[in-house]
Amino acid sequence: MKSVYGIKRLMAAGAVCLGAVIAAGCTVRAVPSPSAAAASANAILSGSSSEAVVPSGTSGKTTPTTEAAAETTTAASVRQISTVTITDDILAADATSYDTGAKLDDRDSSNVPNGYRYYMTNWGTSRNASWLGDTAQNIIYLTFDCTGPEANVPAILSTLKDTGVKATFFVTQDFADEQPQLVQEILADGHTLGNGSVSYPTAGEPSLSPEEQVQDIMPLEEDIYQKYNYEMQYFRFPNGKFSDQSLMIAQKMGFRSIFWSFTYTDTQASASEALQTMEEQIHPGEIMRLGVRSDAVSGALADFISYAHDQGYKFTVFGSDERY
């Protein structure tokens, strides 16, 4: 994908550490207990974590009407997200790149992938990041990555409207530029909008300098705020690649970094294959990352929502107590 605003892409440096199996040069730590991981997830998602940076002020989120979404209005509340100056503590942070996209087959008795608990323990509370939700409850956080063309977004929105489920859509700059009517529809339908970066660098945010990382996030935040009076408070790292330094930058800007404990983006599979995988890997506190370019995803979505409800699961969005 082309870099927007002329952001220079650099070659990724350092080792990539996959899942709970950590490559040479990275510190190996024990996977936390399910209760400890659940407590960490609960603290982060409720905003009660003592170590997480939670900017002051009200949420800044709005659910605009079509008319309100079409024009810039005065600020509804105090902004929570802001740009940052690259300070010595950011420069001193570990820039080793990690990859959330690893396949993790080690699961507990509730089918929760243990590898994501490793991430939660090491970066969840300290960097205000989430790979899992509350694993003590049968809830699912449904999220979509929106890059490039509209793909299956209209069909996905239609399914969500029919089933009464809310989701989080992480958009990139090119999607926001090319599909303003869909951004407006996402907001008008009451879904959450998240920041998916300006340029979606293939090698991830750690491949950019700290200054470039700020410029790969804030212009999109400002653009959405100016056009829709909506403040995105959640950031998704492109391709799931992150570093402690990158997490610190997003945290200092006021974002909660949202990753995932399940992902499905296959553009070649059938809807039945996607549905089978979704059903087999369902688990409490699941953060689902689905690709909007996959016909299999849009084709399986309604059936999966029905299956999840039959299994006693409810859907929710970050920062909300509502269950759908």
Image (tube, helix red, strand yellow):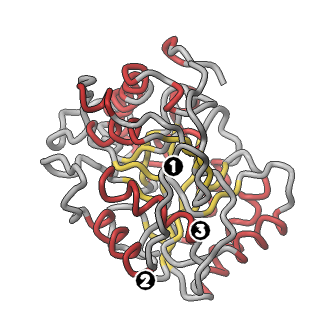
The amino acid beneath tag 2 is Ala
Q: Quadrant of residue 303?
A: bottom right
Choose mark 1 or mark 2, whichever is in front: 2
Q: Is residue 68 visible?
A: no
Choose mark 2 or mark 3, whichever is in front: 2
Q: Give the Cα separation between the discs numbered 1 and 2.
A: 25 Å
User: For residue 169, which numbered disc appears in the image?
Assistant: 1
In this figure, which residue is indicated by the disc labeled 2?
A: 136
Q: Is residue 267 visible?
A: yes
Q: Residue furthest top?
A: 6
The amino acid beneath tag 1 is Phe
Q: Nearer the viewer, residue 237 or 312?
A: 237
Label 3: element kind: helix
Categorize mark 1 by other alpha carbons within 10 Å: few (<14), some (14-19), many (20+): many
Label 1: element kind: strand
Q: Quadrant of residue 33?
A: bottom left
In this figure, which residue is indicated by the disc labeled 3?
A: 162
Q: Is residue 131 left or right of residue 10?
A: left
Q: Position of residue 37 (x, y in %)?
A: 41, 72
